Amino acid sequence: MADDKPKKTVAKPVAAKPKPALAAVPAPAPVKPPADDDDDDISAYGVVTESEEEQKLAQKNKPVFGAVRDKFKRSARGPAAALMVMPSTLLLGQGVLTSVVGLAMFILGLWPLIFNEAPPSDEEVAETMYYILFGIVAFVWGGIVCFGSYQMSTIGSYPWAFVGAVFGLFPLLAGIFSIITLKDPRVMAGYIEPEAGPNQISEDDAVKKLAGEKSAEQDDDEEEEAEEDEEVKPKKKKKKK
């Protein structure tokens, strides 16, 4: 009797179908920065290497600075002033020392005449006048030497510089060095050159000009003037006819 009962059927689980695999999604491409941000991009800069032909061409067209010459003549006053530094300094020291000694001698001679209760005798007056005159001469002598030294250092008046050098021969012989330097053609050219700028005079012409002789340029100018006068004279004779 028990077998007549209906049997319960149990449904078997259905196996799940495998899902299809998803396709790989490509990664998004990097976004390029705008053109204004090139300053922040290090890869935008680099060293451009030249080719061998460009290097040879650049080496060939390279300027040679050794062949460049001055367009205008250099000033002669600068070298002349440099040469006169030492002699003018020695001459100035001697001139100052001579003037100081002269001033001291003048005061020494004048002192007994002023600060003396008793009237001085004739011998004392003669002695004090000797000191006074010697002091005046020494003071003026040193002043001339100092003025000549100034004309040397500033390349001013050549005659006064030479006079100062001659006066500097006494008492310490500092003028010997000054006279030798003043005879240098480079120094003479500096004295001839005007303060406004260099001229086209040579050292030989400078020596001739200081000595009172005619330079080569003056001779050429005189020849040109003579030729012009000869050309003008025949024209005047023709007009008179």
Image (cartoon, rainbow, N blue to C red):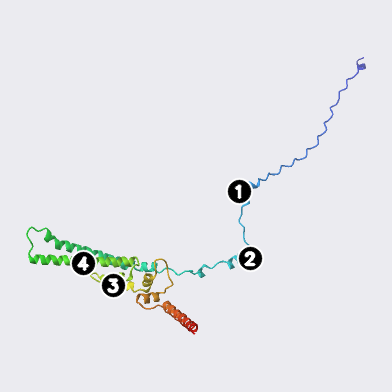
Question: Residue 174: image x %, image y %?
Answer: 27, 69
The Cα atoms of the two marked residues, 4 and 2, are separated by 80 Å
Q: Are marks 3 and 2 in contact (CB under 8 Å)?
A: no
Outermost residue toward the bottom in this view: 241
The N terminus lies in quadrant: top right
Q: Nearer the viewer, mark 4 or mark 3?
A: 4
Residue shown at the point (27%, 72%) measured from the top left: 166
Q: Please name whichever residue, 120 or 88, is drawn nearer the observer in this view of the structure.
A: 120
Q: Does residue 162 appear to the left or right of 68 in the view shown? A: left
Apparent side of residue 134 relative to residue 9 in the rendered image (left or right): left
Q: Is residue 168 above or below residue 115?
A: below
Q: Is residue 28 left or right of residue 4?
A: left
> Which residue in the structure is indicated by mark 2?
53
Lower position in the chain sequence, tag 1 or tag 2: 1
Foreground: disc 3 or disc 2: 3
Q: Position of residue 10 (x, y in %)?
A: 86, 23
Find numbered disc 2 in the image and state the secondary structure of the residue it sits on.
helix
Mark closer to the chain start, 4 or 2: 2
Mark identifier at residue 39:
1
Q: Amino acid at mark 3?
A: Ile
Question: How many residues crowd mark 4 within 10 Å: few (<14), some (14–19), many (20+)?
Answer: many
Q: Which mark is residue 138?
A: 4
Q: Tell me the quarter of the picture where residue 23 sits.
A: top right
